[in-house]
Image (spheres, helix red, strand yellow):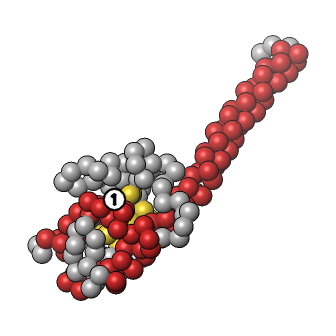
């Protein structure tokens, strides 16, 4: 069993080990909270930028007999519809500005869309110029921000994001 001194030293080491374990868990959780807190403003900034871009696209369409611009040149087409000096880049984008317009909506008349609130118009991507269609990014904020043809923007996540993309595909292809 040991002397009271040996038991006391063992108890002290046990307490130190437990305190160290709690400290490590606390530091780990604290680091996670801090990194999440850093991501939130960037995710929100990208969300707001996507709202600005979708409003500019809809304003463009309104002035062009409700037709969207050519998807290959949408950025140039809407430049005059954005506030001067407005940053239209996702700060976490790896390539380009980080946004893409759905190519199948190129020059489409918005009145011809079956369900604009479920039709993806713009979205975050890390390959904005990839042909034939840039993929949705899944890594930047955990999931992409997505703008729809009626102008609203949502943060897509996991299975929900995939269903949105599939539903938008079905609406655009008529299947």
Position of 41 with respect to 134 (left or right) is: right
Residue positioned 72% across, 36% down in the render? 23
Position of 61 with respect to 94 (left or right) is: left
Q: Name which quarter of the figure residue 76 lies in.
A: bottom left
Question: Where in the figure is residue 81, as x and y percent of width and height?
Answer: 44, 73
| Residue 150 against residue 6 in the figure, above or below | below
Question: Where in the figure is residue 1, as x and y percent of width and height?
Answer: 77, 15
Residue positioned 23% across, 63% down in the render? 103
Residue positioned 56% across, 63% down in the render? 85
| Residue 143 against residue 30 in the figure, above or below | below
Q: Nearer the viewer, residue 12 or 36?
A: 36
Question: Where in the figure is residue 169, as x and y percent of width and height?
Answer: 20, 67
Residue that label 1 marks: 100
Position of 16 with respect to 79 (left or right) is: right
How would you rate the neighbour count of disc 1 (Cα within 10 Å): few for under 14, some for 14-19, many for 20 or more? Answer: many
Residue positioned 39% across, 69% down in the render? 78
Q: Name which quarter of the figure residue 132 lies in.
A: bottom left
């Amino acid at each position: 069993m040991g002397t009271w001194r040996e038991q006391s030293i063992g108890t002290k080491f046990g307490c130190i080990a437990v305190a160290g374990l709690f400290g490590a868990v606390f530091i780990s959780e604290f680091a996670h909270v801090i990194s999440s807190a850093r991501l939130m403003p960037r995710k929100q900034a990208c969300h707001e930028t996507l709202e600005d871009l979708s409003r500019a696209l809809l304003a463009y369409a309104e002035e062009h007999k409700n037709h969207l611009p050519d998807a290959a040149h949408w950025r140039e087409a809407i430049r005059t519809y954005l506030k001067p000096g407005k940053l239209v880049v996702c700060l976490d984008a790896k390539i380009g500005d980080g946004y893409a317009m759905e190519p199948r909506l190129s020059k489409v008349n918005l009145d011809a869309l079956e369900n604009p609130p479920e039709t993806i118009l713009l979205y975050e991507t890390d390959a904005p110029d990839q042909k034939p269609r840039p993929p949705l990014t899944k890594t930047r904020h955990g999931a992409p921000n997505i703008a729809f043809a009626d102008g609203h923007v949502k943060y897509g996540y996991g299975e929900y994001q995939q269903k949105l993309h599939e539903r938008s595909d079905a609406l655009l292809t008529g299947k």
